[in-house]
């Protein structure tokens, strides 16, 4: 589109653009806007137009070479005011929307068996979100999660990507396994109920199985697969080689260490791994630093440890429908710290450091 606006596109490129717009009609409106912006009224002279075309092509090249289309033009690279505002508006429009366009095109080339239009869901702190997948699979996403899925699943697999936490009730289909991809592992199921906790800033990635069977593949060791049975939880180190379940003295970090544990024989609604589904936080002898991350997500705040020693305090408790103030007071009853809330920031200090 940038080349078309700069009037430098070849006949083949214009044909390719037409084919693309037919395949992805949702971008026709955008093309109509940019085409209108191109206009003839007030058109700059030939020399200025060549300069504009050159700048647009440079912009096009930067967009293509950027993985996230997150482009910051240097002062010397900015388009000079040699043309009317229409060209500037068109360039800004292309810059703002190209990321979604090329993400869809890339996936289309990767899987010719499906007309892939991707949806990306980001759940803000303080909220959760329910989704229903194209196959009927139900997903609940926790606060701070980013979830990507196709509008139509491919013929062979049902692939989704998760950064955060999700609870899945997967519709059974033995011919098309359901795969949840995270940064460290892939969970493969045919039809089951399970929870995946895979925040980038957590020390571990956890997969908890409640019903059915799941197969987990470690991304840095594809030959290693772990089968989980109901009431089992898998924990994998997330860039934390010194976590309690890593092998002491092991200097070979090419293989992720992991641990499979059995959950206590209690009701599924009472285990801490899925307490978030009811907007609760349940923690037993956990480090304050780890619980603080859950509090941040639940209450949409930032927690600052002014005394780093507090991070390793072992705390236990249950936070349900309490306000942020009440929640911190509950923890304060059994833990030697003081807190103050300033807007959306909670500051924690040792009791003896009280000002």
Image: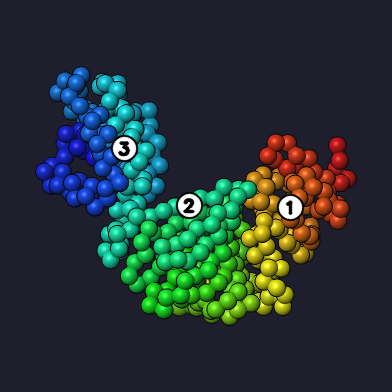
Mark 2 or mark 1, which has the lower sequence index?
2
The image shows residue 261, relative to residue 329, as above or below, that is below
- To which residue does mark 2 refer? 121
Circle number at residue 94: 3
Inter-mark Cα distance, 3 to 2: 22 Å
Write down the quadrant of residue 133 in the picture: bottom left
Position of residue 96 measured from the top left corner of the image (x, y, whole percent): 37, 38
Circle number at residue 321: 1
For label 1, the SS is loop
Q: Is residue 220 visible?
A: no
- x 25%, y 29%: residue: 37
Farthest residue toward the right? 352
The image shows residue 23, relative to residue 219, as above or below, that is above
Q: Nearer the viewer, mark 3 or mark 2?
A: 2
Write down the quadrant of residue 208 in the picture: bottom right
Q: Are marks 2 and 1 in contact (CB under 8 Å)?
A: no
The image shows residue 332, relative to residue 209, as above or below, that is above
How many numbered circles does the render carry? 3
């Amino acid at each position: 589109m940038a080349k078309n606006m700069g009037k430098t596109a070849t006949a083949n490129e214009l044909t390719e653009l037409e084919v693309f717009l037919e395949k992805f009609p949702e971008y026709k409106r955008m093309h109509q806007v940019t085409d209108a912006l191109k206009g003839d009224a007030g058109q700059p002279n030939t020399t200025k137009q060549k300069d504009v075309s050159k700048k647009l092509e440079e912009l096009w090249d930067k967009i293509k070479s950027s993985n996230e289309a997150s482009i910051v033009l240097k002062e010397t690279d900015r388009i000079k005011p040699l043309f009317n505002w229409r060209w500037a508006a068109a360039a800004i429009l292309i810059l703002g929307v190209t990321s979604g366009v090329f993400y869809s095109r890339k996936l289309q080339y990767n899987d010719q068996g499906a007309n892939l239009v991707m949806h990306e869901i980001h759940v803000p702190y303080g909220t959760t979100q329910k989704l229903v997948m194209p196959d009927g699979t139900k997903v609940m996403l926790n606060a701070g999660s980013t979830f990507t899925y196709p509008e139509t699943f491919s013929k062979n697999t049902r692939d989704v990507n998760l950064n955060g936490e999700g609870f899945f009730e997967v519709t059974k289909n033995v011919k098309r396994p359901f795969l949840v991809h995270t940064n460290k592992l892939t969970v493969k199921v045919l039809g089951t109920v399970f929870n995946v906790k895979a925040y980038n800033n957590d020390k571990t990635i956890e997969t908890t199985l409640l019903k059915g069977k799941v197969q987990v593949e470690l991304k840095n060791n594809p030959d290693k697969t772990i089968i989980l049975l109901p009431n089992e939880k898998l924990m994998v180190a997330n860039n934390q080689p010194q976590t309690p379940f890593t092998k002491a003295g092991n200097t070979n970090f090419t293989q992720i260490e992991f641990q499979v544990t059995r959950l206590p024989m209690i009701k599924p609604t009472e285990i801490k791994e899925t307490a978030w589904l009811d907007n609760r936080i349940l923690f037993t002898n956990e480090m304050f630093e780890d619980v603080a991350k859950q509090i941040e997500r639940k209450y949409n705040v930032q927690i600052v440890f002014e005394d780093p020693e507090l991070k390793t305090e072992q705390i236990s408790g249950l936070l349900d429908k309490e306000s942020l103030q009440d929640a911190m007071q509950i923890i304060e009853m059994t833990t030697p710290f003081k807190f103050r809330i300033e807007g959306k920031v909670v500051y924690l200090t040792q009791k003896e450091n009280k000002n």
